[in-house]
Structures are given as C-alpha cells and as structure tokens.
Amino acid sequence: DIYSSSWNSGIVQTVEEEIESLGQRACSYLGSHHTAKENRDNFRRCFLDMGHVLVELLWFKNTTKSVMCDVLEYCLSDDWGYSFLFKFGHCLQRGDESDTEVDRQVAQLIVAEFSHFKEVLTMVWNEETSQKPANDTVHGIKGQRRKGGIMEELHIKRDALLESFHSFDAQYKKLLGEYINPDADMNELIQTTAAITNKFKPLDCGSGWGEEVKQQIPYILAGVFTVFTIRRSGESYNRLSNGGNIEMSTKMLMKPHNIQ
C-alpha cells in the first residue's frame, strides 16, 4: 500500500464529527421558543451549512440528512415548533439579502428535500398559482372535431359549463366545511360519492353521457376533491386553525384550480 487506510477513515470520521457538531449546535438554539426566536439567524446559518454538506459532499449525504432530520424532529417536539419551522422554511424559500447565489440554491433544495417543509411548498404554490376566474377559463375553451377528413369548430356550451362549475364550487365548499373537522367520518363522504357513481354503472362512454350523468358530475367531483384536499392538507389546516392562525391555515389548503 502506498498509504495507510487509516488516512481515509480519519478524514471521514472528522467530517462526520463536524456534521454531528453542527446538528448539536442547531438543537442548542431550540431550547425554548424565546431562544429559537433570539437565535433565528444563527440557526439558519447552521442549517444552511449542513445543507451545503448535503448538496456538495455526496459521500456524506445520508449522514447529513439523518442529522438534519433529527434537528427538524427535535424542533417539532414542542408545540411552538410547528409555527417556527413553517416560518423558517418560508424564509429559506424566499432567501435573504445576505445569501450568496449558492446559498439560495441550497436553501431551496433543503425545502424540497425534507417533507417537514411540505406546508411551505403548498402555501407558495397557492400564492404563485394564478387563480384565473372560472368565467375567463370557460370562455377561453376552444373545441374542434374531425368530420369527413376536415377539422371543424365544435360548439362549446359555455353557459352550461359555468353552471356546472358553480354547482361544483358550492358543493365542494359545503362538503369541505362539514368534513375537514378531524372528528368527521371521511368514509361516509367516500361512500356517498361512490354511491352516486355506482348508479351509472356500467357507463358506455362511446355513446356519450346523458343529461342525468352530466348533472351529477359536479357532485362527484366535489366529493373527490374534498377528499383530496383533506387528505393532503387537512391536518395542517386544523393544527394552524386550532392555534388561532385562521388566515394562515386557509393558505395551507390544497384546493383544485378551476382549470382542473
């Protein structure tokens, strides 16, 4: 051997010890809500340093991710940790004036890498997604069909589509208000929605949908999207809402866009 294997293992041990040290330092800033707020910048810098190791030293990725997860879980061991972590994740997503370009890239990768920040991603998506009015969406729809080898314009029943959307929207809001309560029976909603669809089995799509089917589609979609919203974001909504943060809790709901 040209050099002893202890040379390599010594370096690995030193780096891993430094990663552990960063994790311990980060946890020391989370002793209490007051301490966390006072040391927010120090905590951010410490977590970013671990993020740089996570991104740039792939050999240590698993070790670094494990330590970072432990820090995040430690933060969530107290009730105040949820709101602190949300604000911290939002801060990482937005960036800071003192950050370098690499810092900003690492910060966004951290938010994307850890499920602890899923609420931040939901809120950012809600803020950045253009909520185009349903009326504009429907009037922007164009249709064509092939007839005798020639494409011709297809008449779109826009008034009927808008009416269906408003039926969906009203039912969706009604169901969401009823079932987002953690004590509500979600299976009841699922069974009710399934019962509507079962009435039309078997459905021959080739012959087109009759008026009865079309009238029930808004209610079927309302049930499906209510389950989707609650399953994906109901827990976050209830936790923030019960904590008195009504405005923030509403931003946490993963709602369908009218284009969907």
Image: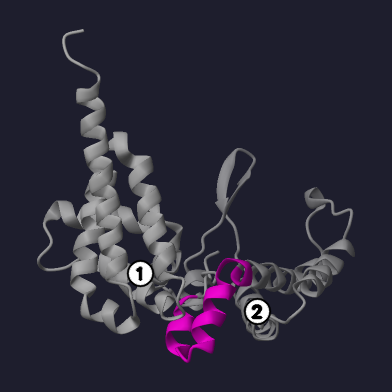
Q: Which residue is mark 1?
A: 128
Marked residue nearer the N-terminal end (1 or 2): 1
Looking at the image, residue 24 lies above or below residue 79: above
Q: Residue furthest bottom?
A: 244
Q: Secondary structure at mark 1?
A: helix
The N terminus lies in quadrant: top left
| Residue 117 visible (yes or no) | no
| Left or right, 180 with reference to 135 | right
Residue sitting at x 28%, y 77%: 36
Q: Say which of 40 and 152 sits in front.
A: 40
Q: How many marks?
A: 2
Q: Amino acid at mark 2?
A: Tyr
**Residue that appears at 46% across and 77% down:** 133
According to the image, label 2 marks what residue? 172
Mark 2 closeness class: few <14, some 14–19, many ≥20 residues within 10 Å: many
What amino acid is at disc 1?
Glu
Q: Which residues are magenta?
A: 229-252
Residue 64 appears in view: yes
x and y percentages locating residue 56 in the rendered image: 23, 40
Q: Residue at x 45, y 79 (%)?
A: 251
Of 110 and 194, which appears nearest the observer? 110
Indicate whether 225 appears above or below 60: below
Q: Is residue 182 left or right of residue 196?
A: left
Residue sitting farthest toward the top: 1
What residue is shown at x 25% (from left), y 34% (from top)?
12
Q: Is 20 located above or below residue 194 in the figure? A: above
Q: Is residue 43 left or right of residue 142?
A: left
Residue 99 lies, in percent from the top left, at: 13, 61
**What's the CA distance linking mark 1 and mark 2?**
22 Å
